Amino acid sequence: MTPEQVKLVKDSFKEVLPIAGVAADLFYDRLFEIAPEVRPLFRDDLVAQKKKLMAMLATVVVNLHELDKIAPAVGDLGKRHVAYGVTAKHFEPVGAALLWTLGEILGADFAPPVKTAWTEAYVTLAGVMSGAAANGTRTLRTAEAELEYLRARLAALEGPPSMPL
């Protein structure tokens, strides 16, 4: 990620934080709509999960300029998610739901450069998580190919920012 992209993510997240609860609601509603197969991976009561999501997002965004410092924690998160039943195929709908949520909240402020910055942030972090989850069994070339595929799929899945729920 470029310093400019990091700044765009940080600045736009300032608009999300005051309505973190709404953002979490939108995210999980959208995720379960586009990927109903992931619903059984979660408890029925999502209150605590929604708080964890927003806390992790805030931590990542605040430290985005120092990815090397947060990479171990993000990797550990990836390893824990394996125990919950998360697989590599789940990263795509999660990314799509995140980008859709940001588009809904930010509206016109989710301009192409902001969307690109968030896509890069997500793809980077998803790569760290999935790499750690795979226990380092993938080669660098395989990991890069998977990230490029995820980047392309997220770009293809994203419709207009104001898609109805």
Image: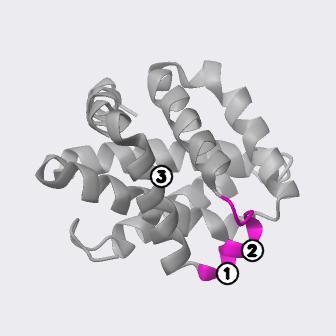
Relative image position of residue 108 (x, y in whole percent): 11, 53
Q: Nearer the viewer, residue 130 or 105?
A: 105
Question: From the viewer's perspective, is 119 left or right of 45?
Answer: left
Mark 1 highlights which residue? 37
Relative image position of residue 50 (x, y in whole percent): 58, 49
Q: Residues within 10 Å of mark 2 (few under 14, many from 20)?
A: few
Q: Secondary structure at mark 2?
A: helix
Q: What is the distance, in whole Å, between disc 1 and disc 3 at their CAs?
A: 19 Å
Q: Which mark is residue 62?
A: none
Residue found 45% across the figure and 30% down from its top: 61
Q: Nearer the viewer, mark 2 or mark 1?
A: 2
Q: What is the distance, in whole Å, between disc 2 and disc 1 at their CAs?
A: 7 Å
Q: Is residue 15 rendered magenta in the image?
A: no
Mark 3 highlights which residue? 24
Q: Earlier in the sequence, mark 1 or mark 3?
A: 3
Q: What is the distance, in whole Å, between disc 2 and disc 3 at their CAs?
A: 18 Å
Q: Amino acid at mark 1?
A: Glu
**What main secondary structure does the magenta stretch of the protein show?**
helix
- Quarter of the figure with the C terminus: bottom left
- Write the start and end of the magenta stretch as one range: 36-45
Q: Residues within 10 Å of mark 3 (few under 14, many from 20)?
A: many
Q: Secondary structure at mark 3?
A: helix
Question: From the viewer's perspective, is 60 left or right of 138?
Answer: left
Q: Nearer the viewer, mark 1 or mark 3?
A: 3
